[in-house]
Image: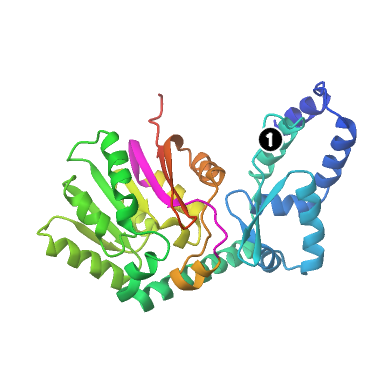
């Protein structure tokens, strides 16, 4: 099916575009290599650094860099700088690309192919290492979390806009709400004033205890607490109407998987609310704040949501004097048949 579609796409008249034949020839050369196709398969839902890809594929950096350059030249992969490292992801395809149909078909086809067991094992190890770095930071700095987070932005700086956003969703008090990574419980306490069915999940026992204490200090007794992450919540079948990740996603080793877990946890018409930093270049946030990612492009979140079959909804962006920008994004799980 995909082969026939590819043949049709190759036979179809190309739109007027300078050097279309030359660029098509270069594209077919770029796609005519098994290793490069393997790289594109690995980047379906994830972004990896050069050294991480070297580990997964078992090749040396100069050879990998050569292949990545060819893929980048043909707009098959995109790059983003994370401090001193360059991370690669699949390029977002645009309508203006004269070869978009071909790329769509190739991506669709290679995504049906399995990833080698050895590569999957290495990917899981890389994700585990990322997660452990974040967990070690929070276990070490649980008593200073608010102070360190305040180096970037205080919760109070955007809480008003966030609650306006939440109120605008028009959700009733009985709404089942899951907050992932509640930290010291500031937002959790505010949510407890709005909703009666509230669950908090955190993979740091120390941070979860702080949230539990904040809830108790404010007189709430019906909040459920779960030690773990979205995968643990998924295994426990915690259905939710609203899932909130408030300044958490940049601490998570695999944002793409978190989107998929969240989609599985959401009830039909449920909402995933992401509050996080836009892309920035402040590398000091890694060591000082335990950040694994230096914010996210709007397109990154849209891409992961699309792969998780979530529909992009409203968004708002808040800029701060220190140069950071926060994005508040809504993604919705559409009921089948609608």
Instruction: Please tell me how many numbered marks the rendered image carries.
Output: 1
207 relative to 338 in the view: left or right = left
Where are the magenta residues, as a range?
265-282
Q: Which residue is mark 1?
A: 104
Q: Position of residue 227 (x, y in %)?
A: 30, 65
Quadrant containing the C terminus is top left
Question: Residue visible at 12% across and 60% down?
Answer: 218
Quarter of the image where one finds residue 166: top left
Question: Residue visible at 48% across and 55% down?
Answer: 324
Can residue 240 be seen? no
Q: Position of residue 213 (x, y in %)?
A: 18, 67
What predominant SS class does the magenta segment belong to?
strand
279 relative to 169 in the view: left or right = right
Q: Is residue 95 magenta?
A: no
How was this image coloured?
Answer: rainbow
33 relative to 237 in the view: left or right = right
């Amino acid at each position: 099916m995909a082969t026939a579609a590819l043949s049709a796409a190759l036979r179809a008249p190309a739109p007027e575009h300078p050097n279309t034949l030359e660029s098509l020839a270069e594209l077919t050369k770029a796609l005519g290599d098994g290793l490069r196709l393997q790289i594109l398969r690995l980047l379906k839902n994830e972004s990896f650094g050069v050294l991480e890809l070297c580990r997964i594929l078992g090749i040396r950096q100069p050879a990998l860099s050569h292949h990545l350059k060819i893929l980048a030249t043909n707009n098959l992969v995109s790059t983003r700088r994370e401090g001193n490292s360059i991370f690669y992801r699949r390029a977002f395809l645009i309508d203006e690309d004269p070869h978009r149909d071909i790329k769509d078909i190739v991506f669709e086809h290679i995504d049906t192919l399995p990833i080698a067991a050895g590569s999957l094992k290495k990917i899981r190890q890389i994700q585990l290492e990322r997660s452990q770095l974040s967990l070690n930071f929070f276990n070490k700095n649980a008593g200073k979390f608010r102070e360190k987070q305040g180096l970037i932005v205080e919760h109070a700086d955007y809480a008003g806009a966030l609650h306006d956003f939440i109120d605008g969703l028009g959700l009733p008090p009985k709404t089942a709400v899951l907050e992932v990574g509640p930290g010291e419980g500031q937002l959790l306490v505010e949510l407890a004033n709005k909703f009666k069915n509230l669950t908090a999940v955190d993979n740091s026992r120390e941070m979860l205890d702080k949230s539990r204490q904040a809830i108790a200090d404010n007189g709430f007794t019906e909040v459920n607490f779960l030690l773990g992450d979205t995968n643990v919540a998924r295994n426990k079948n915690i259905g939710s109407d609203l899932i909130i990740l408030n300044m958490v996603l940049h601490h998570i080793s695999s944002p793409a998987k978190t989107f998929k877990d969240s989609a599985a946890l959401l009830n039909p018409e449920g909402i995933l609310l992401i509050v996080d930093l836009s892309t920035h270049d402040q590398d000091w946030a890694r060591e000082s704040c335990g950040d694994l990612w230096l914010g996210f492009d709007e397109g990154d979140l849209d891409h992961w949501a699309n792969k998780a079959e979530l529909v992009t909804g409203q968004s708002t962006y808040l800029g701060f004097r220190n140069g950071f920008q926060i994005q508040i994004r809504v993604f919705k799980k559409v009921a089948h048949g609608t």
